[in-house]
């Protein structure tokens, strides 16, 4: 832990008074020359042949990239991928870059070009895969009964490649791997089934765990029905730089990066804290739907670092309020419609619609802890959600101390999206 206590709040930093602290700078260093790191990863793939061999004979290739909710060095990776595909004989006209939106909002042409980078956007088609608006192919049903609906452009390709980021994820254990296809490019039926409260409440669906995680296992079942055979995954530092790159078999790449960086992401504490101040950097700070992930990572751990009834303070400017996409909007509506305990009970037996699973897990947090936001530009939307708002971290801590009748034990987590604290 560090004596200097600060947290991210969008693109700014906030000081946190008299707190224990975890800073992201202590996790790992940048990879040096990122372009060299990408080249090395493509030349030395994990548990797979080199892409220039795998792609031989392919007439069409779909490369999926994350939308703006997950920072990823897409332009850097895509340039090398396109060159590798060209070496294999795949023409640029046969390559599509697919932005995996899931149920997030679709992107504009300008946003897509920005996500792919101008060099890639000038060479190949860049389009969205969005679970409601995109035409999907029916690829059957998994043994668990999940309907597999995948964006047709990707499902019909001879080969699919996923570009993504490996970091802790509440349901999948870690993001990356097959998730960019199995969720990012999935239709609403697939997303609804995998994110049903009963599904995500299963034993083993836990942040930081891949082995024995039924959610992760189901994503791999879904991806096995698609042409996904290769992935390039990055690990990002707390300063938004590339920390590591690996390429090859999607599951093996994900497992390799999770194994080598897991100890830096998953941080034990010896005592429960009264207040945890969770820093959230842009773009995760852009709306409450994304920012609330920090609360669920911390509070839904098997041994939470926050004391029962404690306060988690999300430091985020949330300029988009609850969020603009259909999932984000419905999440806010579902949260506002019922008390947390009632919502948890209802979610286990009734469909909650797009984004309803996030309302469900936030309700699970609110049923045991308190959530507040510091830094919101227009905080009025928070009250109907059962979430408090404060002008400063000082004010939030002072409120907790009035409730406690004593000095609060405070923990500051500078980057709560990539530092998951839990009791030892």
Image (cartoon, grey):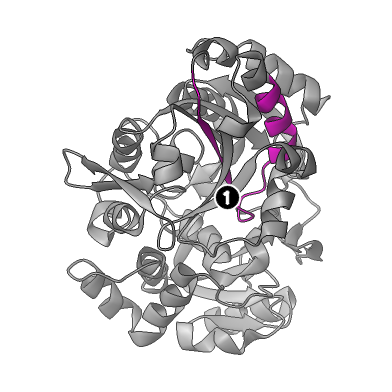
Can the viewer see residue 323 in this picture? yes
Q: Which residues are magenta?
A: 58-83
Q: Residue at x 50, y 41 (%)?
A: 175
x, y (%) of residue 92?
A: 65, 30
Residue 378, above or below 299: below
> Up-down: is 87 above or below 9?
above
Q: Nearer the viewer, residue 25 or 114?
A: 114
Q: Is residue 68 magenta?
A: yes
Labels in figure, total: 1
| Quadrant of the image containing the N terminus | top right
Q: Position of residue 226 (x, y in %)?
A: 36, 33
Direction from residue 80 to residue 181 in the image, left or right: left
Does the magenta run of residues contain 216?
Answer: no
Residue 273 visible to the viewer? no
Q: Position of residue 72 (x, y in %)?
A: 67, 42
Q: Residue at x 52, y 88 (%)?
A: 383
């Amino acid at each position: 832990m560090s004596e200097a206590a600060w947290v991210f709040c969008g693109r700014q930093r906030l000081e946190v008074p008299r707190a224990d602290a975890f800073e992201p700078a202590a996790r790992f260093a940048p990879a040096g020359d990122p372009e060299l790191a990408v080249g090395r990863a493509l030349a030395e793939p994990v548990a797979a042949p080199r892409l220039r061999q795998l792609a031989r004979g392919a007439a069409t290739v779909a490369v999926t990239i994350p939308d703006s909710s997950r920072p990823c060095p897409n332009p850097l990776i895509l340039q090398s991928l396109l060159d590798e595909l060209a070496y294999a004989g795949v023409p640029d006209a046969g390559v599509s870059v697919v932005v995996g939106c899931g149920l997030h909002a679709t992107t504009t042409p300008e946003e897509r070009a920005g996500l792919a980078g101008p060099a890639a956007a000038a060479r190949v088609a860049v389009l969205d895969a969005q679970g409601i608006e995109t035409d999907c192919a029916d690829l059957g049903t998994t043994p668990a009964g999940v309907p597999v609906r995948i964006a047709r452009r990707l499902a019909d390709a001879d080969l699919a490649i996923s570009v993504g980021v490996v970091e802790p994820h509440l349901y999948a254990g870690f993001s990356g791997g097959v998730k960019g296809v199995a969720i990012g490019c999935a239709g609403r039926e697939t997303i609804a089934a995998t994110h049903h409260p009963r599904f995500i409440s299963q034993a083993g669906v836990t942040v930081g765990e891949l082995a024995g995680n039924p959610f992760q296992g189901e994503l791999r079942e879904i991806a096995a029905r698609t042409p996904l055979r290769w992935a390039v995954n990055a690990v990002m530092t707390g300063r938004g730089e590339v920390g590591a790159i690996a390429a090859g078999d999607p599951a093996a790449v994900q497992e390799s990066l999770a194994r080598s960086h897991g100890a830096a992401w998953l941080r034990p504490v010896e005592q429960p804290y009264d207040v945890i101040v969770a820093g959230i950097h842009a773009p995760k700070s852009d709306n409450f739907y994304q920012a609330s992930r920090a609360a669920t990572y911390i509070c839904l751990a098997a041994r939470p670092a926050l004391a029962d009834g404690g306060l988690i303070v999300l430091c985020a400017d949330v300029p988009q309020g609850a969020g603009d996409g259909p999932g984000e909007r419905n999440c806010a509506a579902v949260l506002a419609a019922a008390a947390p305990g009632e919502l948890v009970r209802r979610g286990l037996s009734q469909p909650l619609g797009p984004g309803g699973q996030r309302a469900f897990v936030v309700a699970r947090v609110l049923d045991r802890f308190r959530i507040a936001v510091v830094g919101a530009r227009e905080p009025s939307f928070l009250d109907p959600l059962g979430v408090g708002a404060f002008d400063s971290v000082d004010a939030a801590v002072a409120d907790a101390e009035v409730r406690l009748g004593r000095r609060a034990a405070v923990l500051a987590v500078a980057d709560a999206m990539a530092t998951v604290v839990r009791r030892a």
